[in-house]
Amino acid sequence: MQKFIDIIDFEIKGDEKGSLISIEEHINLPFKIKRVYYIYNTQQKVIRGLHAHKKLNQLAICLNGSCDFVLDNGKNRETIKLDRKDKGILIQKNIWREMKNFSEDCVIMVLADQLYDSNDYINDYGEFLDYINNV
Ligand code: TYD
């Protein structure tokens, strides 16, 4: 199967005071960070995402609780559980994503390589399939 899911296992640089993870562009993150946002207070039955991006690449880390990420490249669909502070999932452009099964305490931090642009979204799965078959 073509690899389209990239998990980054971050090194935990803890000491006796506690744990610390450092994310540095082009060292352990394959892009330059232009935007950071975080998702919290998501109701358990809600499905978020349900879109793809034409240009945007992102990395999501679960800072608290857990949720499931469904990633789909138009040919294959995989579900990854995010439940660790030291595990990031790369969500590249042209990947359909859905997020579900949020725990009540779930906090997802997302690092992004573009500023927010509503025109970069593909919100319809059929359109997504047409788009990726023509890029
Ligand atoms: P959306 O991307 O739909 O969130 P999700 O895919 O997680 O369900 O964004 C939710 C709302 O927040 C929508 O109104 C757009 C807005 N938004 C911003 O203003 N800036 C941002 O960086 C992001 C990601 C969303």
Image (cartoon, helix red, strand yellow):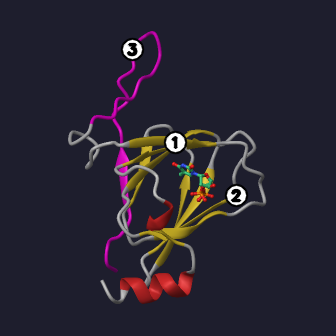
**Would residue 86 be seen by someone viewing this image from the given angle?**
yes
Judged left or right of residue 81, residue 4 is left
Percent of width and height locating residue 124: 57, 80
**Would residue 108 be seen by someone viewing this image from the given angle?**
no
> The disc labelled 3 sits on which kind of residue?
Asp
Tell me which label, 3 or 1, sits earlier in the chain.
3
Image position of 42 with respect to 56: above or below: above
> The disc labelled 1 sits on which kind of residue?
Tyr
Task: Count neighbours of disc 1 (C-alpha within 10 A) and say few if under 14, some if 14 to 19, many if 20 or more.
Answer: few
Percent of width and height locating residue 26: 21, 42
Q: CA distance from mark 2 to mark 3?
A: 33 Å
Tell me which label, 2 or 3, sits earlier in the chain.
3
Q: Nearer the viewer, mark 1 or mark 2?
A: 1
Magenta stretch? 1-24
Q: Is mark 1 within 8 Å of ligand 1?
A: yes
Q: Secondary structure at mark 3?
A: loop
Percent of width and height locating residue 27: 21, 39
Task: Identify the residue position indicated by label 1 in the image.
Answer: 37
Q: Nearer the viewer, mark 3 or mark 1?
A: 1
Q: Residue at x 74, y 60 (%)?
A: 46
Residue 23, magenta (yes or no): yes
Task: Count neighbours of disc 2 (C-alpha within 10 A) and say few if under 14, some if 14 to 19, many if 20 or more.
Answer: some
> The disc labelled 2 sits on which kind of residue?
Asn
Q: Secondary structure at mark 1?
A: strand
Task: Identify the residue position indicated by label 2 in the image.
Answer: 101
Task: Identify the residue position indicated by label 3 in the image.
Answer: 15
Front one among 113 and 40: 113
